[in-house]
Amino acid sequence: MLLTLAWRNVWRNRRRSAITLSAIAVGVAALTFVWGFIDGMNREMVANTTRYFAGDMQIHLRGYHEDQTLDLAMTNAAAVLGTVLADPAVAAASVRLEGRALASRGDKSRGVALVGIAPGQEVRVTDLFKAIVAGSPLSATATNGVLIGSRLAEVLRLTVGDELILVGQAYDGSVASSRVPVRGVFETKIDELDGFLAVMPLDAVRDFLAAPGGGTAIALRLKDPGALPAAEARLRMSLGERYEVIGWPTLLPMVVASVRYHEVTGFVVLTIFFIVVAAGVANPVLMAVLERTREFGVMLAVGTSQARLLRVVLYEAILLGLFGLVLGNAVGVGVTMFFQYQGIDFTAFEAGLRTMPGLSDVVYPVARLDRSLMISAVVFGTACLVSLYPAGKAALLEPVTAMRGMAGLSRRARGGGGTAIRLPVFVLVAARNILRNPRRTAITVGGTAFAIVAFVFLFGYYDGFSEQIIDNSTRYLTGHVQVERAGFRQDLSTDLSLGSSDTLLAQLRGAPNVEAAAPRIQAQGIASSTTKSEGILLIGISPEVERKVTFIDRAMVEGAMLRTGDDRSIVVGRKLAETLNLRMGDKVVVMAQAADGELGTAAYRISGIFATESASFDGGIGYVTLSAAQSLLALGTGVSTINVRLADPAALDETVDTLRRHLRGPGLTIVSWPALLPQVDEMVRVIRIMRAIVLVIVFAVTALAVMNTVFMTVAERTREFGVMMALGTSPGAVVRLVIYETFALMTMASLLGYSLGVLLVTYFARRGLDLSRFFEGYVTIPGVTGIAYPRLVVASILGPGIVLFLATILASLYPAWRAARLDPARAIRHA
Amino acid sequence: MNAPDVVVKLEGITKVYRQESVAVHALAGIDLQIRKGDFAVLVGPSGSGKTTLLNLIGGLDSPTSGSIWVAGVEIGRMSRSQLSRLRLRDIGFVFQEFNLIPVLSALENVEFIMLLQGVPPGERRNRSVALLKELGLEGLEHRRPNQLSGGQQQRVAVARAIAAEPIIVLPDEPTANLDSKAGGALMDLMRRLNEEKGVTFVFSTHDPMVVERARRVIRLRDGRIEADELRPT
């Protein structure tokens, strides 16, 4: 009976029920899709990064993961492989020998990870061979030949059949070199693999590195990837203390960092949605009770117990919640599943997506039952929870006063304050109506203000984050503009130098908006300590001039930045020093392809270590003086690039145009930072799209909630509007009155929301938001540092704020129009 | 309209409502003239058509057939906004439930109509204050409706109805929510306004006290006029 009553009540006010339903449904659908999207990205990242190369797990000699040196190669790899294969959870396993080498062809070179594999075993563990786009995989019996990634092939201008020269440091410390034919080119769309991996038969690498019988890793694939923790524990037991068993989360910390970053971002967004949805649900449920005070009074008067009344109201909320969930899940799961099969094509942002390991062009969201259940449970719980308050209020009503009207629930008007009409009367009426139901006003204003706070903060965070990435990348690495010979950037080839830079420098320094210009040499090289090698970007700088363009000297944590004449010194990042196991004063040997076609080699001592908090800087760059680099690379007085810092970075495009008109030279190009750092540029664009999506959903739910409130205020004042119209108020004036009320609500919400939002952004802009835990391992995004400083960009929050304001005013037009269309004779009789 | 003192004239008025699929004949052929200065009551049992007739005269509703003239103008085919202007200019309403605008004070409620009519602020303020004083509400001008008693609220409603000097005031069961003392006082007040200011009143009522004070009694039954009698003053 009570359920029937609740059911009929739901149907009685269809409009209110429809609004409540849509608030729940939009929220559930949005939550489902956003979560599905994040899950989809994460799943692809994990699947792609593990399936192409890393495998589900790897076995090393203890300590190898931390210190990847040939000293920690397993000499009895075959025996370990046997133990691993005997584990019931292991589907396949493969022995590998890994080392570093400088890969060159002609005058082009690049530091690579050289990996020896047993093709017959490897094909059962990873899908690398399936990613071959030219040539063929290594055959099981192959003794020679190399597979390289598509980017490496592009940079070194190699095709199948060409020969690649590999230079590296052998197990015994000697310099190893070999000439190897390219058998195939693979494309995994993972930059670290496509750009920096060279794969050869195991025995060939053993020969090259002078490590017969050795293996540094055993990669394995599990029958069930979900069984990772159990298999890890079992293998640790069976292999003993001498070996380390490393699952993919440890092998690929950047994937874990990305997944965690997505989850954190996702949870922030989801929490905001939950609260907005909760406010959207609370409002109509509350109103549904308030407007039926008299009816509840009658029910109490005829003997309905308080508990039963409470149940009727709760049942109504439950019914609405259930309908909303069904509808929201149908739409949310439907849309998610549609895109799960279709995929969402982000080809336009490929470079941006590739900054996240394992992601490339198409993202496939995942519909998951557990997610849907969780979203449903939380939204449903919220709906029931928010209905408890009005339900309790209804049950505690005094029947007699309730039957007389709104007593007990509606607020008593304030005392006669002697106010007279000074404001236009409809503005006055609107303002007083807002104060008439403080609870409803508080819910609406609070919910809307929260949405505004959320968007102001998110925008501040994204703006600060984007600006920080741009600022860090340009000020540590590239400057705002780079002058180079056409094509230089593709392979950093030494034969594309600018020649003598004096004239160009003078021209640049005289150009408008140019704050400073510094000549540089940039080349790919390989840096070796006594035990290890690592590919680096070697940068030759003119220290005093460089200081005016980039600020790497401000990031020194040990020693000091180079000075002119320090031609035997090198400054490296902290991570590189750690990888190579180097300290201040230690010797580093750098090899790079020289302009004369020879392999340039030089030894330097570490005179400084910098830390920028960006893994890609700290782990892959070495600075030497301009003259040291010129000597190493046989460039004479030539330089590779001139890097420019602008006085006003916002005037980038105009300055680049001016420079293009004024600077002349054979093949000279002026490149602005978005082209120098495409992944930064696209990351910033991806961020903009993400925040737009978040904004649209939050605003849609907010506008719906405000529209609902306006509907409620109109519905509960039907008689009042009827009276006003009977007295001769025109329909237009009624519409204005309703709009004034929305205006007042939104003004309050905006003032509150913007004030809190601005305070929050300002606070964190000073204090910084320490997200280093989530960004460690984010090596592929230059400029990403651990601490984000949100930034208040008035221009970027003003537009959406105005749009939200107008959207809610527009949303209130419908209830306003309904009010204006009321039949006064019937409205006056409305109870 | 024939006689110059007729302010409202109804000819052959019928009103049929549809409730679900059943047609309800609220009015079944009404011919009636209200003259300037009338102090008339519509009486009859529930469902006899009193409120419907009052709504038609006030331009709140349109007849199914027949014609209605208010101040010489046929209102049956007026648009919503024309009717809205008619109500603003020529009609005053007093409702059974008082129906003051809850967020406005007594004074502001009285001023409201004049404000819609565009009466200058100083003038409408003076007139409202004077009216409230005349109706015995001096000192209560700035109270909100829920701070006034039922009788006081209904007097504010009367003040609001006559403030704009309409040609006719239509109180619908004005005493139904008042005790007999407050009801009697309200009727005396309206009668005084009728006599001293010549305000035309047409009431609908069940209340014998209202009927007692009326000078013209129009009895309705089943949507027809059963009797229309004048009483000596």
Image (cartoon, coloured by chain):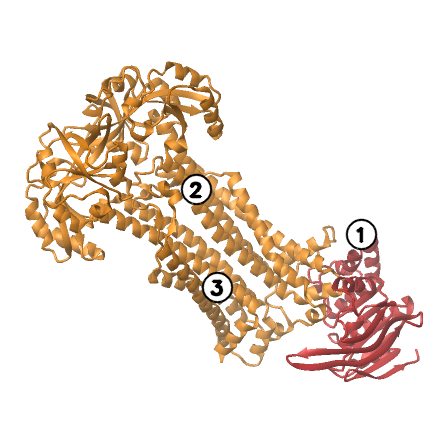
Chain colours: A orange, B red
Q: Relative to A555, say whether B153 is above or below.
A: below
Q: Are marks 3 and 2 in contact (CB under 8 Å)?
A: no
Residue A433 placement (x, y as % from top left): 65, 58
* Residue at numbered disc 2: A462
Give the amino acid at mark 1: Pro
Q: CA distance from mark 3 to mark 1?
A: 46 Å
Residue A346 placement (x, y as % from top left): 39, 46
Q: Residue visible at 79% across and 61% down?
A: B85
Left or right: where A750 falls relative to A66: right
Label 1: chain? B
Q: Quadrant location of the C terminus of chain A?
A: bottom right
Left or right: where A723 falls relative to A691: right
Q: Are tags 3 and 1 found on a single chain?
A: no
Q: CA distance from mark 3 to mark 2?
A: 32 Å
Task: Classify mark 2: helix, strand or loop.
Answer: helix
Between A668 and A304, the one nearer to me in the picture: A668
* Residue at numbered disc 1: B121
* Residue at numbered disc 3: A386
Task: Classify mark 1: helix, strand or loop.
Answer: helix
Label 3: chain? A
Left or right: where A732 falls relative to A158: right
